[in-house]
Amino acid sequence: TDQYAVIGNPIGHTKSPLIHGLFAEATQQAMSYVAIEGPLDPDVGFERVVRQFAAGGGKGMNVTAPFKLKAFALADERSERAILAGAVNALKFESGRIIAENFDGIGLLRDIEVNLGVPLAGIRVLMLGAGGAARGALLPFLAAGPAELVIANRDVSKGEALVAQAGSRRAGLRACGYGDLAAMGRFDLVVNATSASLTGELPPVPPSVFSPDGTAYELAYGKRLTPFLRLARNAGAHGVADGVGMLVEQAAEAFVWWRGMRPQTGAVIDRLTVPLD
Ligand code: ATR
């Protein structure tokens, strides 16, 4: 039985063992997948726990907060998207080497395009936030070819740094503050990639950004109708979704990478979906 794990701290609420367990069952893979509470104590060391798991026959790991940067640092090889995200959410242990990937952005994109049926090509996209979550989404989003991608953040310099980081791929990309949004009209897709919803807060976004046939996407999941989604719905946005689909899709990408086969995600998303209200 090949061994896999998710490592984070805290880790008690992780859905990853359930998701990968369902994938393994559906695809008849002989594998185990457990949750590991990573050490915050630098004397014990995150890296040591990862290397022990690999040395004990572990084949791969998912990495969640607060270890995504540490996982990036310890890897021997990093994919382009891990490098561009500056963070890692999946590791593969192969011939004594640690290979790092980041599937958060591609998982988000797949959920929006495939599951929600909203292709980004040619549309106006607004992303709120310029932290780790936004950085992971940036390049998959740009590759999908939106007409415009606007990054709004309280600290505008962080948004500008993201734009600069996108290098030559920045057609239609710009950063702004929340105060600029009222003059920018409606967006087809508004993604909340801030951490505001984790504390029940609302980013200072004007209702005028939402459009009646548009979509509002909340990266957080399991929080029911967050203040952001409530605002979007009250402003008449046609589709509102939380991040449960992104969670399952990033897991599916890791599963493909590890096992060489793509699991179906629909039934797993349905099983984890909590009605928004
Ligand atoms: P994550 O990895 O979840 O993105 P992060 O890197 O700490 O976390 O980034 C948090 C993001 O949420 C930032 O963009 C932050 O905005 P600032 O950079 O301006 O601080 C944003 N954020 C957090 N709380 C917010 C709030 N109440 N309103 C608006 N933005 C908020």
Image (cartoon, grey):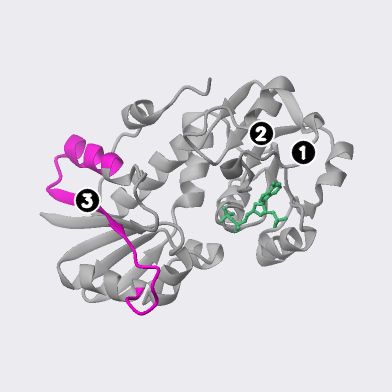
For image coordinates 22% across by 72% down, the residue present is 52
Residue 268 lies, with reference to residue 60, above or below; the image says above
Asked if disc 1 is less than 8 Å from ligand 1, the answer is no
Spatial CA distance of label 1 from label 3 is 40 Å
Among the two numbered marks 1 and 3 on one chain, the one whose residue lies closer to the N terminus: 3
Q: Give the residue pinned by disc 2.
A: 228
Q: Start and end of the magenta stretch?
A: 18-45
Write down the residue under mark 3. 33
Few, some or many residues within 10 Å of mark 1 (<14, 14–19, 20+):
many
Looking at the picture, does residue 8 appear above or below residue 201?
A: below
Do tag 2 and tag 1 residues touch (Cβ < 8 Å)? yes
Quarter occupied by residue 8 = bottom left
Task: Give the residue displayed 86% in from the left and 45% down from the top.
Answer: 179
Residue 178, x across and y down, in percent: 81, 46
Q: Amino acid at mark 2?
A: Phe
Q: How many marks?
A: 3
Residue 191 x/y as whole percent: 63, 40
Q: Which mark is residue 205?
A: 1
x, y percent for residue 185: 84, 34
Alpha carbon separation for disc pair 2 and 1? 9 Å
Residue type indicated by callout 1: Val
